[in-house]
Amino acid sequence: MKTFNFLALCCLLLGGQAQAKTINSGDYSIELAPAPNWVKPTTMPPAPGQLERSPSHYRLLDRQIRIEADSSSFFQGFAAIALNQEGVKQLSKLELSFNPAFETLVLHSLEVQRNGKWSDRLAGAKINIINEEPELSNDLFQGMATAVVISHDVRIGDTLSYSFSIQGRNPVYGKEFSSGISMGWTEGVDSLSMRLVNSSGRKLYLDPKQMAPAVQSHDRFGDEYLWQQSAVPKYLWEQGAPQSYTWAPTLYYSSAANWGDVVNWALPLYRFDQPDSPELAAFVREVKQHTGKSEQLAEIIRFVQQDIRYYGVEIGQNSHQPHSPNEVFNHRYGDCKDKATLMVHLLAEIGVESYPALVNSRIGDALPERIPAAIAFDHVINLVRFDGQDYWVDGTNNSQAKGLQQLSQADFGNALVLRPGNQALSPMPQASAEADRISVDMHYVSANYDAPVDLYVTTRFAGRQAEDMRFQLAGASDWEVEKHYLNYYAKFYHDINQAESILIRDNNDSGEGMLIREHYRIGDFWKSTGHGLDFSLFATNIKSYVELPEIINRSQPLLSRGPIKVEQTVRLTFPEHINFLLSGEDSKIETQDISYRSSGSYSQGQLIRHHELTLPSRVVAAERSRDFIETLRKIDNDLYYNGSLSGDFSKPVNPGLSYLEQVRKEADQ
């Protein structure tokens, strides 16, 4: 699916058409030419008399799509008024991305209206075509090009209009077609038009979300579907809403009648009839030396996840067609579909059943609500069947524990398994807060009221939380981790230093998760008040899970950080056994979206505060978001504990060596 930045959209008006010409820039080229004859002109309405304060005002947005048997064309026109200097900056620079492997970008018009008169800007525009890879930071190379068009002499109050088309369709789709077109923006639009022409000879399946029915007709180019609207309102995606939420009108269309059609399209892409290379055959023999099928299976998963580097060369048909197992093995790199294909091949060599499975990493939960389409997926994993059970394995996850029983199964909501005859999506097992958990023990040990306090922090990560921590630590040295953690605690204590090197223990092979142990020395823990001492305790780790969202008054669902369970125990061992009266009450909150409880106790010179937070699901419904946010506020207030001691603390306390040794043993546990 091709998407465009709404601030760099191109405009329509078919007056001032370009003469046919080719613009070359480096290794790329675009065309200047009149709009194709299948495009119908759209009239721009007069500018409204009153305009609200904004960088620009959208006057016209026109989108027209023609679907042919083996190709597609996308036409777009756009007109807007620049209302201030920021609007001039935004509208006078046009950025259009296309894939030169199978697409051609054609500019049709570029005009400016000033004082009621139109003038051409395309002839004098500065046009550069650059290789810009938006996914390169994610190790994906797609061969994309971007045309940057700079219009000259644009002023405040001018109306700019652009029109362009992108012609071509990735040949990997063959005669299949599908797309999704957003029809809502954060700016209002005076006139909106969407026209879809089906010239393919195939049945077209439509799924217009939050849109009125189309006006249907037929002309010499095919069946036409037209949506038109005036005074289109603004639409706002609320920060924190799940990506699967349809926040604005959107048109989905597809040639697939059901999910079985998508399976039948994809299956041939994953078939390779070639013998193993000598290197691959040698590796298979090495794997078979492991005793037991489960050990062989574990080694293959480990190899694909760990030894095949994630890097995707997705040029042309390789956007969806994987490279052969031989290529992936010999290169020692590949993207998700490359890894999935290699895993299927290797598992077949040891007699284990496995299939590629198409998933969507962003909107997987919403797939049952969408029409079947090849573009509905952005990721490929594996379904592995072993000993009568199904396992969902992500070959790109190089942070998992070794062994089928230890790894956390991939959870993308729904998957389309590429198995002959499959006609339906498969629901995937949901993540569990009990399995994905963090346990933190913070132990403050005070040997004397006028001496620094030792802080021991032991954190245990299980399930996906262990995987996330492995991923974070893989990109940092121990020194960097130590500095990061120390600076975090320095937000609460001005006089804090690292007392010991950080200890990181990864029980990867056993599946017991990860352990991180820290030791600090705090010089300003006790705060003198003149008549006693004050101190503060804070459940720091839970705090990050109860941060308020950016948008409080919501009309859209809210992503929580679940599913997860976080337990944090904060202990303070005093220099001596004292009479200490614990303030505050225990807390307990139980709702559909959050569970929290806290308790406190004091005994034999030790104060203990225990906190337990459970977020059972990923998403909070919009109608429950208000109560959820209010609960976050209550929990946040409960994470802090302030205590006071009265008396004379100027004399040193000698608790005895045996007492201090016992405290140290407790901290080491």
Image (tube, helix red, strand yellow):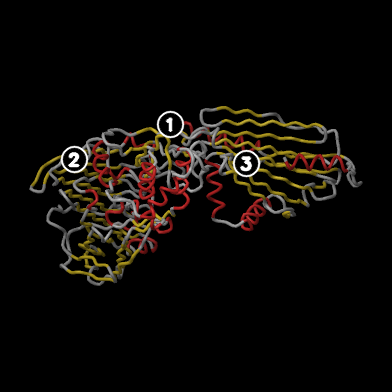
- Residue type, mark 2 in image: Leu
Q: Nearer the viewer, residue 1 or 332?
A: 332
User: For the point 34% across and 48% down, which residue is it?
Assistant: 185
Q: Secondary structure at mark 3?
A: strand
User: What is the number of the mark on residue 460?
Assistant: 3
Which mark's residue is nearer the viewer, 3 or 2? 3
Mark 3 to mark 1 CA distance (whole Å): 31 Å
Question: Decide: marks 3, 2 in contact (CB < 8 A)?
Answer: no
Residue 635 coordinates in the image, percent (x, y):
61, 35
User: For the point 16% across and 39% down, which residue is it?
Assistant: 203
Q: Is residue 258 visible?
A: yes
Estimate how packed mark 2 is, as few (under 14), some (14 to 19) or many (20 or more) residues with alpha carbons within 10 Å: some
Quadrant location, the C terminus: top right
- Residue type, mark 3 in image: Arg
Residue named by callout 1? 387
Residue named by callout 2? 204
Mark 1 to mark 2 CA distance (whole Å): 42 Å
- Residue type, mark 1 in image: Asp
99 shown above or below 508: below
Q: Secondary structure at mark 1?
A: loop
